[in-house]
Image (cartoon, rainbow, N blue to C red):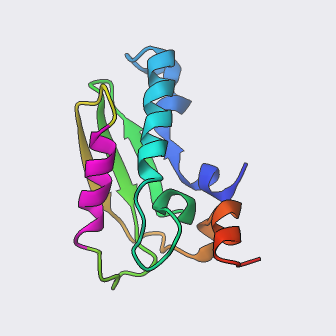
Amino acid sequence: MDAVAENAKVDAVAEAEESAIPTEELDRITNDIVAALKTVYDPEIPVDIYELGLIYRVDIEDDRSIKVDMTLTAPGCPVAGEMPGWVENAIGTVEGIAGVEVNMVFDPPWDPSRMSDEARVALDMF
C-alpha cells in the first residue's frame, strides 16, 4: 500500500457493513471521488493533490454528503483560500452525492513522506 492509500482514509468504505449505502454504490462513489481529486493540482507543483498526500480524510455519510479534511504543502501557500473551493467543485461533479464540505487542517503538518511513489517519480524525488 502506498503512502497516499495509508494517509487518505475513506472511512465509509472501511465501515461498509454499517453504511446505509449499498457496497457497490459506495465503491463507485469512492472511486469517482479519487478520480475527481486527481484533477486538482497545486499550481506550483505538477502533481495532483491526491498523489501529493494533501487529502487526509474523506468521509461518505449515509445521506451521501461528503466531508473532506485536507492540508497544504505549506500554511502560507498562495492558493490556500482557493484550493478548498477547487476540491469542493471537483468532488461536486461526482454523480449521486448530496454535497461537499472541505475542511482545511494543518495537524499533522504535511511533509514529503505523504507523497505517493507516482508523485515522487513526477518530482524526481527518489
Q: Is residue 114 above or below residue 64?
A: below
Count of number-bearing discs: 0
Q: Is residue 81 above or below residue 69?
A: below
The magenta segment is: 81-93
Q: Is residue 26 above or below residue 42?
A: above
Classified by dominant secondary structure, the portion drawn in magenta counts as helix
Q: Pick the quarter of the image with the C terminus.
A: bottom right
**Residue 6: x, y in percent?**
63, 51
Answer with left or right where residue 88 lies relative to residue 7. Answer: left
**Residue 55: x, y in percent?**
46, 57
Residue drawn at (42%, 40%), measured in percent from left and top? Answer: 33
Q: Is residue 88 a member of the stretch shown in magenta?
A: yes
Residue drawn at (54%, 65%), measured in percent from left and top? Answer: 52
Answer with left or right where residue 87 lies relative to residue 110. Answer: left
Residue furthest out toward the right: 126
Quarter of the image where one finds residue 81: bottom left
**Residue 34: x, y in percent?**
48, 44
The answer to which of 67 and 85 lies nearer the viewer is 85
Residue drawn at (43%, 80%), measured in percent from left and top? Answer: 44
Residue drawn at (32%, 24%), measured in percent from left and top? Answer: 62
Answer with left or right where residue 65 lies relative to residue 126. Answer: left
Q: Is residue 89 a member of the stretch shown in magenta?
A: yes
